[in-house]
Amino acid sequence: MEDNILERILDGSMEPTDLPLETLRKITDNFSESRIIGEGGFGTVYKVIPLQAECSEMMLLNVHPLELRFPFIPKSTIPCSLHLTNKTDEPVVFRLMEKNVRCSAYMIRVPVHGIVPPNSTYTLVLTTYEMNELPRETNMDLILQNSVANSYIQPFIDDDECEQFFEEVRETGDTFSEVALQAVCAPLGETIYEIIPLVRTTCIIYSFDGHPTEPWIIMGLIDGRVHLWNYETQAMKSTKIVVRKQWFLAGDTDGYIHVCNYGTELKKITAFRACSHYITSLAVHPTKPYVLSSTLRDIYLWDWDNDWNCVQTFSEHSGTVEHITFNPRDHNNFASSSADRTVKVWNLDSPESSYTLSGHSDTVTCLDFFTRDDQLYLISCSDDLTVKIWDMKEKTCIRTIEAFTSPVTCVISHSDRPYLVTGSKDGLVHLWSSSSFRLERIFAVPRGGVVCGLIWLRESQGFVIGQDRLVTIMDIDNEE
């Protein structure tokens, strides 16, 4: 009732009147100094934001923040995150749209829609257009519509299908609620919450890697260029960093591996033909002078102390080798995933695989090792819309996660914290507990494109999402 009165006062349909003190505290963020806009004849003037619906039955999503602030930076794309927490046992469909239908002043895409799974948080990343000057209209009123859906609901094909869903909800009288929000394009220096400004590239990103101690990310682009990005100062087909040599490696589509030094200046050291086809993946041995490279059906072991000679070949896969990674507990072992739907585990001393893990029904796109209760496991993801967890001691699959609606393209595990992260072709990133395999959060960047890579940051407070032409850094700890 109080919220309805406030709305009518704000839209001019009702004269100002007395409001309870508690309501005034809520709409001014407890009379926060950041809300002060001046002094009037009767005292301090505060900027207010309408309350969310008070009815607990209608509060399907906990929404934070209610005010989205986009600090203005000329000729830059500025992100801000919106956290939607579903504490119910049913999926909740949402649609974020402008309150008054008109041409959006500075949001890249409105409306935006999605599905928040039961008992999880969905982080939606909204971004501005690149602008030369602060827009004339700096405030935008938004409405977040949400409704409960059945467990079989699939992502909407387009905005029209989403509109049809909400029309049916209104007609049937199903549980439905709206939350008022506001987007503000503010002067530089205002808070943008936990997202470090993202970087866009002029062409598609094929792969990237992160330095373990420096704030550097290396990106291999489809046009053959390699970018080294410092994400603190904002200042090829497969790429890898070799820290102990101050090198980065880049494998190209012609089968060459390029070796460059990133010390005092970027300098190319050498390049050699590794295969007759494109390089699909690279892996650097943690202690020995070895690099693994993969191509259509073969994996090669290269020794840089021996003039980059090939010292072993592994050729059992019947389909393209998609990804290779070393075992963190036994560096003489590594695993590979392939379009032949299998995962193979190898020993560097033998050209024959130690054993094969079968169970996926389509290409196994990526894999990584992780530990749980001091036991070694492997996580694999696939175009079959699943992720599988493998017990490396028993050599069996102990869990299949089927929570995806598009092919899963990449996966990483955290070495010190109980987290697994997966990226999908639909652009969604899922954060999982490696202890219970429970879904913790979902991250979405509208129009970001296919997730092509994931990297943990050097200080472990967040991770990097690589998409078609976009790199975003997310914080996993701050959703308040």
Image (tube, helix red, strand yellow):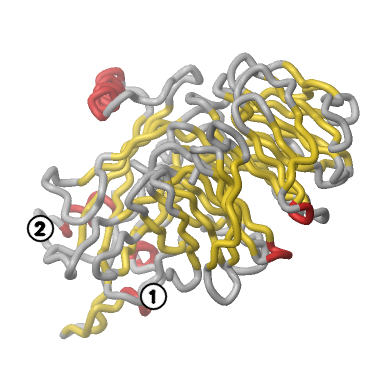
Query: What whole-number distance in Å separates the C-alpha atoms at marks 1 and 2?
Result: 25 Å
The residue sitting at 68% across, 30% down in the picture is 380
Report which quarter residue 343 is drawn in.
top right
Q: Earlier in the sequence, mark 1 or mark 2?
A: 2
Badge 2 crowding class, 10 Å Cα cut-off, few under 14, some 14 to 19, many 20 or more, is few
Return the x and y of residue 264 as percentages of the image width and height.
Answer: 57, 77
333 or 158: nearer the eye? 333
Element class at badge 2: loop
Return the x and y of residue 449 as percentages of the image width and height.
Answer: 39, 39
The residue sitting at 26% across, 63% down in the picture is 184
The residue sitting at 21% across, 85% down in the picture is 39
The residue that mark 2 highlights is 12
The residue sitting at 85% across, 46% down in the picture is 331
| Residue 73 versus residue 253 in the image, above or below | below
Return the x and y of residue 162 as percentages of the image width and height.
Answer: 29, 27
Element class at badge 1: loop
